[in-house]
Amino acid sequence: MKKGTSLLLAILLLISCNSPKKERGRILIIVSNTEDMGDPEKHFAGNNLWEVAPPYHIFVSHGYEVDFLSPTGVEVPFSMDPMGISSYTIKYENFLERVENSLTPDEVDFEEYQAVFIGGGYGPLFDVAYDEKIMSLIAKIYENGGIVGGCGHGPGAFANVKLSNGDYMVKDKKVTGFPNSTEITKDWAKNGTLLPIMLEDQLRDNGAVFQTKSDLADKHDVVIDERIVTTMFLPSSAIVAKEMINQIEN
């Protein structure tokens, strides 16, 4: 078993054991409807199951109701989970039923949600990041005192969120996500050349204080700044969810 997978399993066990079950509020998870990156050699974009199902499990096991939102409310493509990390939440916590009934932006009342989370996979960079209604919802949840969280490529999907004063939500805030230094070494999206944006560049362009590997003691660290909770890589997706809960409750 790979080190990252072992770490994620250990995290899930640690932070979900003996968690309270009383419903405490609602959290919105935003996912992509985009599957195709426009290149026959690199077909899949979608959502990374490992970066969405573990946070969902943490939220529901701590008593939160979770809704899914996608730009169109239709099919939500996910990568496979060969290690079965997500099997429990799929079988026992209605993950697939929730995803298959994802809401559209017009069906969401921002006042009902205490937090919003976007996981990785390339998909959100293609549609979520440019959906004006979704960007507006995220801004309203944040300005209503809510928490915004993301993992991997997820933070790139909220890089373009603007607040009511016209500033980008990430302006002057420490934020991290899948870094350029790793993107250009991977052929998953042809070294980033298939992507509509390079996540790190977009966050920096919009005023974020992007945290690279050299800024963090450990590349799996979670960065928290003014109710924005982010991490670079998928093994920390569950920790992001737990830190979001800490932010809500404290």
Image (cartoon, rainbow, N blue to C red):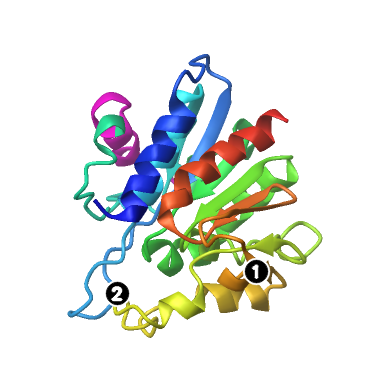
Q: Residue 133: percent from the left, percent from the top? A: 56, 55
Q: Name the residue under label 1.
A: 215
Q: What element carries label 2?
A: loop
Q: Label the magenta part by its dominant secondary structure.
A: helix
Q: Residue 66: percent from the left, percent from the top? A: 46, 32
Quadrant of the rendered structure where residue 86 is? top left
**Disc 2 crowd, CA 10 A, few/some/many (<14, 14-19, 20+):** some
Q: Most extreme residue toward the right, as rendered?
A: 165
> Where residue 188 is drawn, which disc sits there?
2
* Closer to the camera in the image, 115 or 234: 234
Q: Is mark 1 on a helix, strand or loop?
A: helix
Q: Is residue 189 above or below residue 169?
A: below
Q: Give the range drawn in magenta.
A: 90-104
* Mark 2 residue type: Trp
Seen at 44% across and 23% down, the residue is: 17
Q: Quarter holding the C terminus?
A: top right
**Disc 1 crowd, CA 10 A, few/some/many (<14, 14-19, 20+):** few
